[in-house]
Image (spheres, rainbow, N blue to C red):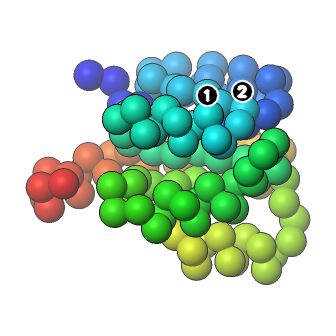
Amino acid sequence: MKKKILYLEDKDTVVKIVCAYLSEYEVYCFENPLKALSWLEEGNIPDLILSDLNMPEMNGKDFLFYIKSRDVYEKIPFVILSGESNSSIRIELLQQGAEDFISKPFNPVELKVRVDKYLKTSTQDVAKNGY
Protein backbone atom coordinates (compact mmCIF):
# COMPACT_ATOMS: atom_id res chain seq x y z
CA MET A 1 0.00 0.00 0.00
CA LYS A 2 1.28 3.44 -0.93
CA LYS A 3 2.06 5.96 1.80
CA LYS A 4 -0.26 8.99 1.91
CA ILE A 5 0.94 12.57 1.89
CA LEU A 6 -1.36 15.49 2.67
CA TYR A 7 -0.02 18.49 0.76
CA LEU A 8 -1.26 22.05 1.26
CA GLU A 9 -0.20 24.50 -1.42
CA ASP A 10 -2.07 27.18 -3.37
CA LYS A 11 0.35 27.56 -6.30
CA ASP A 12 -0.38 25.13 -9.15
CA THR A 13 3.16 25.15 -10.52
CA VAL A 14 4.63 24.11 -7.16
CA VAL A 15 1.98 21.39 -6.77
CA LYS A 16 2.89 19.93 -10.18
CA ILE A 17 6.61 19.83 -9.33
CA VAL A 18 6.08 18.26 -5.93
CA CYS A 19 3.58 15.70 -7.22
CA ALA A 20 5.91 14.72 -10.05
CA TYR A 21 8.81 14.04 -7.66
CA LEU A 22 6.65 12.29 -5.08
CA SER A 23 4.70 10.16 -7.57
CA GLU A 24 5.48 6.92 -5.72
CA TYR A 25 3.20 8.17 -2.93
CA GLU A 26 -0.49 9.00 -2.84
CA VAL A 27 -0.41 12.80 -2.65
CA TYR A 28 -3.63 14.53 -1.64
CA CYS A 29 -3.38 18.22 -2.54
CA PHE A 30 -5.46 21.02 -1.08
CA GLU A 31 -5.07 24.73 -1.71
CA ASN A 32 -7.15 25.55 1.34
CA PRO A 33 -6.38 24.15 4.82
CA LEU A 34 -10.07 24.14 5.77
CA LYS A 35 -10.74 21.65 2.95
CA ALA A 36 -7.82 19.58 4.19
CA LEU A 37 -9.35 19.55 7.68
CA SER A 38 -12.61 18.25 6.21
CA TRP A 39 -10.63 15.48 4.47
CA LEU A 40 -8.97 14.58 7.78
CA GLU A 41 -12.29 14.59 9.63
CA GLU A 42 -13.62 12.06 7.10
CA GLY A 43 -11.15 9.61 8.65
CA ASN A 44 -8.21 10.05 6.31
CA ILE A 45 -4.90 9.84 8.14
CA PRO A 46 -1.81 10.71 6.09
CA ASP A 47 1.68 9.39 6.79
CA LEU A 48 3.16 12.88 6.28
CA ILE A 49 1.94 16.46 5.96
CA LEU A 50 3.66 19.00 3.70
CA SER A 51 2.40 22.54 4.01
CA ASP A 52 3.01 26.00 2.68
CA LEU A 53 2.51 28.89 5.13
CA ASN A 54 0.58 31.50 3.14
CA MET A 55 -2.75 30.12 2.00
CA PRO A 56 -6.36 31.31 1.83
CA GLU A 57 -8.70 31.16 4.86
CA MET A 58 -6.15 29.56 7.24
CA ASN A 59 -2.38 29.80 7.19
CA GLY A 60 0.06 26.92 7.52
CA LYS A 61 1.14 28.03 10.99
CA ASP A 62 -2.40 27.76 12.35
CA PHE A 63 -2.84 24.45 10.54
CA LEU A 64 0.35 23.11 12.19
CA PHE A 65 -0.85 24.23 15.64
CA TYR A 66 -4.21 22.55 15.06
CA ILE A 67 -2.64 19.27 13.93
CA LYS A 68 -0.11 19.12 16.76
CA SER A 69 -2.81 19.85 19.36
CA ARG A 70 -4.92 16.82 18.38
CA ASP A 71 -3.98 13.39 19.76
CA VAL A 72 -5.09 11.62 16.60
CA TYR A 73 -2.78 13.71 14.36
CA GLU A 74 0.07 14.84 16.60
CA LYS A 75 2.50 12.05 15.61
CA ILE A 76 2.17 12.70 11.87
CA PRO A 77 5.44 14.21 10.60
CA PHE A 78 4.80 17.78 9.49
CA VAL A 79 7.13 19.53 7.03
CA ILE A 80 6.84 23.20 6.11
CA LEU A 81 7.68 24.04 2.50
CA SER A 82 7.73 27.83 2.25
CA GLY A 83 9.50 30.92 1.01
CA GLU A 84 9.38 32.45 4.51
CA SER A 85 12.75 34.08 5.16
CA ASN A 86 12.17 35.19 8.76
CA SER A 87 14.31 32.99 10.99
CA SER A 88 12.23 33.63 14.11
CA ILE A 89 9.10 32.29 12.37
CA ARG A 90 10.98 29.18 11.19
CA ILE A 91 12.26 28.59 14.74
CA GLU A 92 8.76 29.04 16.17
CA LEU A 93 7.34 26.49 13.70
CA LEU A 94 10.03 23.96 14.60
CA GLN A 95 9.39 24.54 18.31
CA GLN A 96 5.66 24.03 17.77
CA GLY A 97 6.18 20.59 16.26
CA ALA A 98 7.21 20.89 12.62
CA GLU A 99 9.83 18.26 11.88
CA ASP A 100 11.47 20.30 9.15
CA PHE A 101 11.38 23.57 7.24
CA ILE A 102 12.34 23.48 3.57
CA SER A 103 12.85 26.87 1.95
CA LYS A 104 11.45 27.81 -1.45
CA PRO A 105 12.83 27.76 -4.00
CA PHE A 106 13.78 24.18 -3.24
CA ASN A 107 15.60 21.36 -4.97
CA PRO A 108 12.92 18.73 -5.73
CA VAL A 109 15.43 15.89 -5.37
CA GLU A 110 16.35 17.12 -1.88
CA LEU A 111 12.64 17.34 -1.03
CA LYS A 112 12.15 13.72 -2.13
CA VAL A 113 15.11 12.53 -0.06
CA ARG A 114 13.75 14.28 3.03
CA VAL A 115 10.22 12.98 2.49
CA ASP A 116 11.56 9.44 2.00
CA LYS A 117 13.51 9.80 5.25
CA TYR A 118 10.47 10.94 7.25
CA LEU A 119 8.24 8.24 5.82
CA LYS A 120 10.82 5.56 6.56
CA THR A 121 11.23 6.88 10.13
CA SER A 122 7.47 7.02 10.74
CA THR A 123 7.12 3.40 9.52
CA GLN A 124 9.85 2.30 11.92
CA ASP A 125 8.21 4.18 14.81
CA VAL A 126 4.89 2.47 14.15
CA ALA A 127 6.51 -0.96 14.05
CA LYS A 128 8.53 -0.23 17.19
CA ASN A 129 5.88 1.59 19.26
CA GLY A 130 2.68 0.06 17.90
CA TYR A 131 0.99 3.30 16.76
| Amino acid type for the residue under numbered disc 2 | Val
Q: Is residue 45 left or right of residue 7?
A: left
Q: Which residue is mark 2?
A: 15
The answer to whether the residues at label 2 and label 1 have Cβ atoms under 8 Å apart is yes
Image coords of residue 56 (percent x, y)? 81, 42
Image coords of residue 96 (percent x, y)? 57, 74
Q: Quadrant of the N terminus?
A: top left
Q: Is residue 84 left or right of residue 51?
A: right
Separation (CA) of disc 2 from disc 1: 8 Å
Above or below residue 42? Residue 130 is below
Q: Quadrant of residue 75?
A: bottom left
Element class at badge 2:
helix
Above or below residue 83? Residue 113 is above
Crowd tier of the residue under label 1, counting other residues whose Cα lies within 10 Å: few below 14, some 14–19, many 20 or above: some
Image coords of residue 26 (percent x, y)? 45, 23
Labels 2 and 1: the sequence-earlier one: 2
Q: In terms of depth relative to the viewer, which is nearer, 26 or 40? A: 40
Q: Quadrant of residue 130?
A: bottom left
| Amino acid type for the residue under numbered disc 1 | Cys
Res 29 label: 1
Q: Residue at x 45, y 55 (%)?
A: 77
Q: Residue at x 54, y 42 (%)?
A: 37
